[in-house]
Image (cartoon, rainbow, N blue to C red):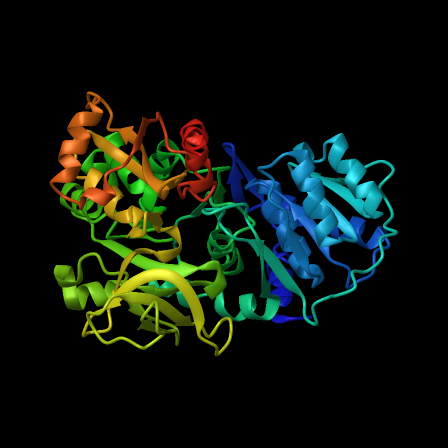
Amino acid sequence: MNKLSQLAAQVLERRSDEPALEFEGRWYSWNEVVALADKLTTLIDASGGPQNGPVVFIARSRGSAIGAFLALIRTGRTIRMVYPFQSPAGIVRDIEMMEPSIVVATERELKEEVLEGIRARGAAAISITEMDATHIAGFERSTAALPAALPAEPQIEILTSGTTGKPKPFAVKHEMLGTYFTGGTMALFGKDANAVELPPALLYYPLGNISGLFGILPSVLNGLKLIVIDRFSVKDWHQYIVKYRPTSNGTPAAAVQMILDAGIPKEDLASIQYFSTGAAPLDPRVQSAFEERYGIPVLLSYGATEFGGPVCAMSPDLYAEFGKSKFGSVGRPFGGAQIRIVDQETGEILGPGQEGLLQVVSPKMGPEWIHTSDVGVLDEDGFLFLRGRADGAIMRGGFKILPETIQEALLGHPAISAVSAVGIAERRLGQVPAVAMELKPGAQQPSIEELEAFLRERVLATYIPVHWKFVDELPKTVSLKVDRPAVIALFADQAQASA
């Protein structure tokens, strides 16, 4: 049994009436979580699938999903996560691609079309509910053949965030998760895993991506209680902070402006000493406004699924040493990670203060340099400052435009709360910029002429958008990142007209 499976087994030995997790206002005891895990394990064993056959897991962030996930990890099997927030046809395509012996899913995902896809594969199907598991009638036994190519070691194939397209599977070995996701990263952000009285951890990231693993595993494997909500809301987050008074906390970057817009009283966040955020860039003006209103330092971090999570962070210790002199930085590498900046055209390694593409060595994933499309700068003290993504650049008649430049400028307008700039196809120039915008609560909608004049004072003429659109809310992935394909789809009519 590998280390991660051993840790899951130890957690599932906690047979008591003590509360383990809360979902939709109800606390479930460890006895209930363990009972679900044991029943699911029994059903998997009875399914007849080979021990090394992969299991597909389709689950939203629910209480039962946590218990089921622990059970699957305990079995030592390869787990292949399928994105639940898609059509039944999309789920069937993923099942065909992932070739499971067994499919475990929350009840709402097992629609007739999905069951037909499972039947075609010959896999067994198990439904989980709060807090129970059962075989789907007619799907009790697996006759599925093993995939031609199986990993040598058990792994969890998680999903990328879906920021630039459909979430894609990415494999992380059990052994890596067991080694790196149990304590060290918690301490980095001011969370002492050995402290006696830690508040429950609030989980709202999707279970199947790196942020979900980063939220679940350190908490559960270190014995913390969980409060599970199916997706982030300022209301739920606010209630959690007021009730449990954590000394450190954080949210996705997109939620910081949402908190400011909600007008949460300063005293309600008084317990928080440090506020961490990452996974997407945070506009410096938003960071500054949050710090000024609440008096809480915002600690940024940088990571990716391909790195196995964060590799760079502004920790409390670094903030204590450097204070605001490194404002806007995502900190220094930690945990043995290395970062360098290279020239986008030549690959030459660049020195302090020179902007280029980031390359990363993440010990969690191996000794090789990982090439990224992220643009950044390292200063003379080794602090990283992000500038945007090269692969999101808009090519307008030979001029390269970084969307972040447009977004940052428009966020300086007093009426604008959030912006997404994207490239729209255009016959003559190839692409032209388009922006979708949210208004701040109570703000009067400015005219496009006013916004264009505002923008012309801050960016080059080539950066001025051709298409503008106000929306009630920018489309987002379940990780609370802006869903760029969905934003582009908002301008489908304009793109067709330009083609």
In this rendering, the answer to whether 311 lies above or below 99 is: below
State the image coordinates of residue 107 (x, y, percent, origin top left).
Answer: 69, 34
**In which image quadrant can residue 129 be found?**
top right
State the image coordinates of residue 337 (x, y, percent, origin top left).
Answer: 39, 73
**In which image quadrant can residue 269 be found?**
top left
The foreground one among 208 and 98 is 98
341 relative position to 236: left or right: left
In the rendered image, is residue 466 in sight? yes
430 relative position to 465: left or right: right
In this rendering, the answer to whether 22 lies above or below 402 is: above
State the image coordinates of residue 374 (x, y, percent, origin top left).
Answer: 36, 60
The foreground one among 408 and 423 is 423
Q: Residue at x 52, y 52 (%)?
A: 209
Q: Residue at x 54, y 42 (%)?
A: 61
In the rendered image, is residue 135 in sight? no
Quadrant the C terminus occupies: top left
State the image coordinates of residue 218 (x, y, percent, origin top left).
Answer: 48, 59
Question: How many tags in the picture?
Answer: 0
302 relative position to 407: left or right: right
Q: Residue at x 64, y 36 (%)?
A: 130
479 relative position to 429: left or right: right
Quadrant the N terminus occupies: bottom right
In this rendering, the answer to whether 470 lies above or below 255 is: above
